[in-house]
Amino acid sequence: MPQPVAQPASAAPLVQVRDLAMTFDVSAPWLNRVLERRPRQLLKAVDGVSFDIPKGKTLSLVGESGCGKSTVARLLLGLYTPTRGSFTFDGQDAHAAFNTPAGNLLRRRVQMIFQDPYASLNPRWTVEAIVGEPLSEHGLITDPGALRQRVAELLVQVGLAEGDRSKYPHQFSGGQRQRISIARALATEPEFLVCDEPTSALDVSVQAQVLNIMKALQKKRDLSYLFISHNLAVVRHVSDFVGVMYLGRLIEVADKATLFAAPRHPYTRMLLDAIPKMHATGRARTPVQGEVPNPLNPPSGCAFNPRCPLANERCRSERPVLHNAGTTQVACHAVQEGRG
């Protein structure tokens, strides 16, 4: 298996994911299957994903809805047990640790920022209770006065006021709510944050504010991020490395500058060509062609072949694997053969 992203020789990556897969059984109930003579249906939401994230760096996963990005996030948080593969955090088998008493210590080091700030905050709790909950649950602070002081410090760090701790979520805008979510995620002083489209529910101007806060916190605390998004403009702003997913698999992995300047996979080119460009005003943009295939019945060979202008018979029969193409990793027969 090729190594996902080249790392400095001085240290191992903080996050190492190898051949991670998650299959869901979405079959009809047993009796229905018997009466209607239908087989079981298995959905491969994630199918053999591998990547590294060095300490203090950001890897973004991009792709159309349903490609498996959020499932990867839930696998790294221990919310799902993978069908196969491994997730190693700071040299420790994370999935084995999640099921032991030591899992609480690991969960302190790995936190999540959720997509919807309107759904992820309990409307009946004050901000102090929301942000202070991780500190109480993990036994980090037991004194009420010290807890109030720590919550106030966290709120100030994300651009809110100390006095906001006595308010309720409905008294804040969407961007302010997401700052509260970031403060809650930072409460246990984690080293790795999984960010599942944290700005997609926000206005563009507010997105920039939240992203700048996240970048400043990353620099100050040396945080590592897995940033999940379908917005390539946001990805370009926050990423060090980018992984492009399609139907549960990584099809291209590269550093940000290389991927945006010289994408190799036809799907990546299609996504980037659909972005509006200031210098190309008046030029018709190329839409992303075709539809994502049914994940319950994916195409044989390369999953992208029905939409790919470079597809040939090999693409329709043999599934490509990630291979090194310069500084990029790409899963594409056309690139490997020099046709793309």
Image: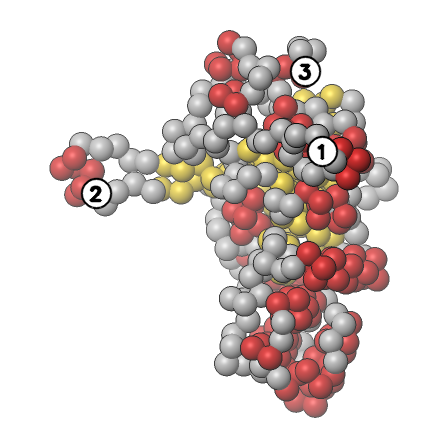
Tag 2: residue type? Answer: Trp
Counting residues from the start of the chain, the first of labels 1 and 2 encountered is 2
Q: Is residue 80 rendered to the left or right of residue 130?
A: left
Residue at screen point 54% across, 81% down? 125
Residue 218 position, x and y percent, is: 79, 58
Counting residues from the start of the chain, the first of labels 3 and 1 encountered is 1
Tag 1: residue type? Answer: Gly
* Disc ID at residue 124: none
Q: Are marks 3 and 2 in contact (CB under 8 Å)?
A: no
Q: Specify whether residue 321 is in view.
A: yes
Residue at screen point 59% across, 15% down? 310
Quarter assignment of residue 186: bottom right
Q: What residue would you read off at disc 3?
A: 340
Residue at screen point 50% across, 28% down? 290
Which residue is at the far left?
35
Q: What residue would you read off at disc 2?
A: 30
* Quadrant housing the N terminus: top right
Tag 3: residue type? Answer: Gly
Residue 52 position, x and y percent, is: 70, 41
Mark 1 lies on a secondary structure that is loop
Q: CA distance from mark 3 to mark 2?
A: 46 Å
Q: Nearer the viewer, residue 122 or 282?
A: 282
Which residue is at the far bottom?
145
Q: What residue would you read off at disc 1?
A: 282
Within-10-Å neighbours for mark 1: few <14, some 14–19, many 20+: few
Within-10-Å neighbours for mark 3: few <14, some 14–19, many 20+: some
> Is the residue 246 above or below the residue 81 in the image?
above
Residue 109 position, x and y percent, is: 67, 61
Q: CA distance from mark 3 to mark 1?
A: 27 Å
